[in-house]
């Protein structure tokens, strides 16, 4: 029998997988969609498309006639790292709802830093009544590192709130209302003027520890950082040193080298760090399933794949 099945391949719980299966089956009633956990060797040989959530490489190896893979997540660096010899196209999730949610989070936590919420929380714990000077948003520069879909959406929300926005991207890109830069010199320039730096970069070999001691030192004294990208992009030791030395004021971290963040980690109790449990932009199952189903439906009708990941670049 020619390959014709779709397999859901994940490290999710059985209950979570059941939810995704129900959505995908409703949206693609003419397809045979099953969890890989329910397939024997003969059924695995019929699988043409794998819908995945950080799959175990050994599970992908069970699919000898696989034609392409659709990730349920926007970030695919784990798949790229764990499947370095992947021979079939990989499609990542591109969901406008994800961009909206991320832009909402960037604005919320930028305002958290801009309005000195960490300092007021410290004053409350100390029973200290202390009013801090107010700055207007146009006096604050927010630097966005990464001007892809998420970065562009975040820039729009920050512009609407009155902040001055500059941005850096690996390759040149124009974004309305944003002073855009690229290349090594552009990164130096953006960091040098960012009162609040927001990291939205993909994790690649080039961005791993991109924000090291040397680059963090480029930030203005008292600058603050939001990392909503991936933990390894920031050198955590260099960041804590900059915070301890007073060179930086505060950091909001939603992503870490190891997740969940281990209980013994000193980051939990660092007075200048806000720890979040990777919640800045969760995948919306309803919109994500609709996008995956739409991409598969167009592939069945037209034989054309959605845009695929450049495995050399990692995104």
Image (tube, rainbow, N blue to C red):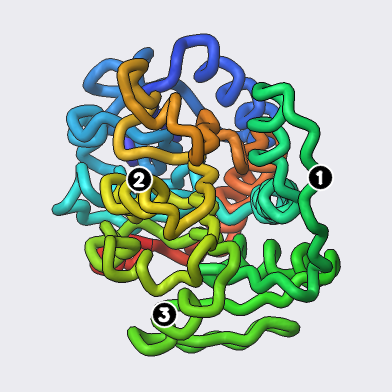
Q: Is residue 178 visible?
A: yes
Element under disc 1: loop
First in sequence: mark 2 vs mark 3: 3
On the image, the x and y values in percent for residue 80 come to 27, 51
Q: Residue at x 67, y 75 (%)?
A: 165
On the image, the x and y values in percent for residue 280 come to 61, 41
Q: Which mark is residue 187?
A: 3
Which of the two discs, 2 and 1, sits closer to the camera?
1
Task: Mark 1: give few (<14), some (14-19) or many (20+) Cα within 10 Å.
Answer: few
Task: Say if mark 3 contacts mark 1, CB within 8 Å.
Answer: no
183 to the left or right of 278: left
Element under disc 2: helix
- Choose top left, top right, bottom left or bottom right for residue 103: bottom right
Q: Is residue 121 above or below residue 251?
A: above
Task: Say if mark 2 contacts mark 1, CB within 8 Å.
Answer: no
Please name the residue that numbered disc 1 is placed on: 131
Quadrant into which the C terminus falls: bottom left
Please name the residue that numbered disc 2 is placed on: 240
């Amino acid at each position: 029998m020619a390959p014709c099945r779709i397999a859901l391949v994940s490290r999710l719980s059985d209950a979570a997988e059941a939810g995704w299966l129900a959505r995908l089956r409703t949206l693609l009633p003419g397809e045979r969609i099953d969890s890989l956990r329910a397939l024997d060797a003969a059924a695995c040989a019929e699988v043409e498309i794998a819908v995945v959530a950080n799959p175990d490489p050994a599970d992908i190896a069970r699919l000898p006639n696989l034609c392409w893979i659709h990730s349920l997540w926007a970030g695919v660096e784990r798949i790229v790292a764990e499947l370095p010899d992947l021979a079939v196209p990989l499609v990542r999730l591109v969901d406008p709802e994800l961009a909206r949610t991320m832009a909402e989070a960037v604005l919320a936590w930028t305002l958290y830093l801009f309005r000195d919420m960490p300092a007021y929380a410290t004053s409350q714990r100390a029973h200290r009544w202390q009013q801090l000077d107010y700055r207007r948003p146009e006096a604050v520069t927010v630097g966005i590192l990464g001007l892809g879909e998420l970065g562009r959406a975040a820039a729009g929300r920050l512009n609407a709130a009155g902040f001055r926005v500059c941005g850096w991207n690996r390759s040149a890109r124009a974004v309305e209302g944003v002073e855009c830069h690229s290349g090594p010199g552009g990164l130096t320039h953006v960091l040098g003027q960012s009162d609040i730096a927001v990291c939205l970069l993909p994790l690649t070999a080039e961005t791993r520890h991109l924000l090291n001691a040397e680059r963090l030192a480029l930030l203005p004294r008292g600058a603050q950082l939001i990392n909503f990208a991936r933990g390894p992009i920031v050198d955590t030791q260099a960041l804590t040193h900059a915070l301890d030395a007073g060179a930086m004021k505060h950091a909001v971290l939603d992503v870490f080298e190891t997740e969940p963040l281990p209980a013994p980690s000193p980051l939990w109790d660092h007075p200048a760090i806000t720890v979040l449990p990777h919640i800045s932009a969760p995948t919306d199952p309803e919109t994500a399933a609709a996008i995956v189903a739409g991409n598969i439906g167009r592939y069945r009708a037209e034989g054309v794949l959605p845009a695929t990941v450049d495995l050399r670049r990692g995104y």
